[in-house]
Amino acid sequence: ESLDGVLLDLGVSSTQLNWPERGFSLLRDGPLDMRMDLDQPLTAANIVNDESEIKLADIIWRFGGERESRKIAKAIVRAREKCEIRTTKELAEIVEGVKPRRGKKTHPATKVFQALRILVNDEFGELKQGLKSVSSLLKEGGRLVVITFHSGEDRIVKNYGRVETRDYDIPGEEDVPALRIDRPPRMRWVNRKAIRATEDEVTENPRARSAQLRVLEKLRM
């Protein structure tokens, strides 16, 4: 309970993404890795080559929001039956076979790579734990500021804020009004809606296009 504020910037390091040997890049060939922590065993190659078609489709949709997730999962399974998928280029080409680029600026495999990176590094789980941890360190009146770049991340922050700003707890997963346990709110929203980058900011830094900033303030308990 000693911090006046905490800023969580959930953007991934552009430098790290551009290292071919780390397996994040769509544009440079490298091993299908995507681990932030190189000591952990799980890699993107493990997921791509070992998971079932149904599970792959679910991963690509849930973490990447890719509408063609089922077709892409089917293509991946068909390709790996012939030979193990080992590189970023191989995976990107498989996805592009399902979703031709046709002059689009964004590579068709972007959401697939994003989904794999999020799962490999348990980014959503880390965020949930991080929100709880840093909130416990805030002083009364201290602010928690979070910048997200993905709808899934933003949903986690909103849900966390919804729980912290309400005046009751629930004993289980389902919110049954009759079972609510009264308590004072632990935090308040400083801004009801997310703050987005201005047109000038996006022009200067295109990656800010998807950024959303939310602010919570800790209350007296």
Image (spheres, rainbow, N blue to C red):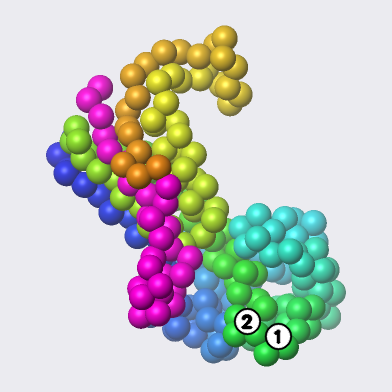
**Magenta stretch in the rendered image:** 193-221
Q: Position of residue 210 (x, y in %)?
A: 48, 65
Residue 166 percent location from the top left of the image: 42, 26
Task: Tell me the kind of residue under disc 2.
Answer: His
Which secondary structure lies at badge 2? loop
Residue 114: x and y in percent read 57, 67
Q: Residue furthest top?
A: 178
Circles 2 and 1, Cβ within 8 Å, touching? The answer is: yes
- What is the spatial separation of the Cα atoms under label 2 and label 1, in whole angstroms? 7 Å
Quadrant holding the C terminus:
top left
Amino acid type at mark 1: Arg
Determine the image quadrant of residue 38.
bottom left
Which residue appears at 75% of the width and 84% of the height?
Answer: 100
- Name the one closer to the observer, 110 or 103: 103
Q: Front-most of 152 and 206? A: 206
Question: Quadrant location of residue 176?
Answer: top right
- Residue occupying image coordinates x 20% and y 36%: 141
14 part of magenta stretch: no
Q: Which mark is residue 107?
A: 2
Residue that numbered label 1 is attached to = 101
Asked if residue 45 can be seen in this view, the reply is: yes
Q: From the image, which quarter does the N terminus lie in?
A: top left
| Residue 74 left/right relative to 193 | right
* Mark 1: secondary structure: loop
